[in-house]
Amino acid sequence: MNIVHSITEVQDDISKKKSCGNKIAFVPTMGNLHGGHLTLVDKAKALADEVVVSIYVNPLQFGVNEDYDAYPRTMEKDCQLLEKRGVNLVYAATTKEIYPEGSEYHTHVTVDSLDGMHCGKTRPHFFRGVATVVTKLFNIVRPDIAVFGEKDFQQLMIIRKMVNDMCMPVEIIGAPIAREDSGLAKSSRNGYLTQSDRETIAPTVFEALNYAKSAIQSGERDYDAISRHAFTMLANAGITPDYFNVCNPKTLLPACEKDNTIVILAAGLLGNVRLIDNIHFSIKH
């Protein structure tokens, strides 16, 4: 496995791979890898000849009260996991090259129609940061395929729209949510939870999602009432709800009665740890 740090190095390596006719799959990450990330790598390996993973903690994704400096950097462990998984190239990007004039002076990319709702309401900086860095990474790596997790459903939809709107020549693949035995969606944030919170309280988010799915598939169409009950479930468990929204999966706008597919997006705080999750399903009329 080759580990490179500069744009020139990563592009030279990928040019050699492409000259041999190899298909390139790309998995962008911020490191601190867990089992969920590895399922993305496995998906990428199944779809392409070569897998490239980037590890870069993007400052544009952090707000004023979010501690960019405290985000875990576990490069050695991450590279060991990726090598065991058969990754061909790791791009350990540097801020000096990604934002040479400083992130505040860099050109920013926004997807206005999708980034101001759900997580975007309480983290207005976040999706602009994601769209900006992913655009730059796509232009550096120039992959044929890029794999993103469905746990961050709003992010996945934003990336898909951005790629479509800007005619970027990369296919976006969503990988199913990886879950712990309790149902809790695997996330780097889970490492901040106590064992008790992780095993007994945090899984309530998935329980609330399953309650809502069951109610809707049973014929309930009062989505506001379903959301209120889910809020109560979360609050009673000790989670401070942020949102619990029943949506059209393409527009991320509130679902209406004629929608045949539904995505329910949920977020809340357990202590200082932000938990996000979703569930996506079809319904019959």
Image (cartoon, helix red, strand yellow):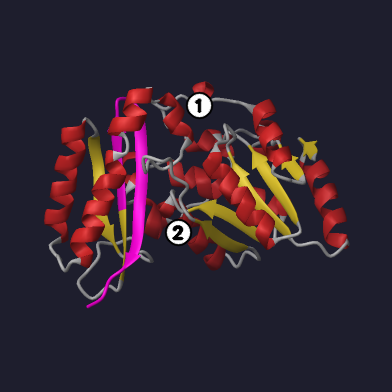
Q: In this view, does 135 lie to the left or right of 62?
A: right
Residue where numbered disc 1 is placed: 68
Element type at mark 2: helix
> x, y (%) of residue 164?
54, 67
In the visual, does 121 lie left or right of 6? left
Please give the label number shown on residue 157: 2
In percent of width and height, residue 181 lies at 41, 41
Q: Position of residue 126 (x, y in %)?
A: 44, 41
- Looking at the rendered image, the quarter that the N terminus falls into is top right
Name, please, the residue furthest toward the bottom. 285
- Measuring from the top left, give residue 162's x and y in whole percent: 52, 60
Note whether residue 136 is visible.
no
Tell me if 93 is positioned left or right of 22 in this view: left
284 falls in the magenta region: yes
Taking depth in this image into account, of 59 and 242 the one nearest to the observer is 242
Distance between the Cα atoms at labels 1 and 2? 25 Å
Residue range in magenta is 265-285
> How would you classify the magenta stretch by its main secondary structure?
strand
State whether residue 7 is above or below residue 278.
above
From this view, report whether residue 191 is shown above or below residue 259. Answer: above
- For label 2, count other residues whose C-alpha is less than 10 Å away and answer few (under 14), some (14-19) or many (20+): many
Q: How crowded is mark 1: few (under 14 residues within 10 Å), some or many (20 or more)?
A: some
Name above or below for residue 5 compared with residue 178.
above
Instruction: Name which residue type carries label 2.
Output: Met
Q: Quadrant of residue 145?
A: bottom right
Q: In which quarter of the image is residue 20?
A: bottom right
Query: Is residue 137 in the magenta section?
Result: no
Q: Residue at x 48, y 34 (%)?
A: 188
Q: Which amino acid type is shown beneath numbered disc 1?
A: Tyr
Q: Which of these two is toward me, 59 or 81?
A: 81
Is residue 240 something that shows in the picture?
Answer: yes
Q: Which of marks 1 and 2 is nearer the N terminus?
A: 1
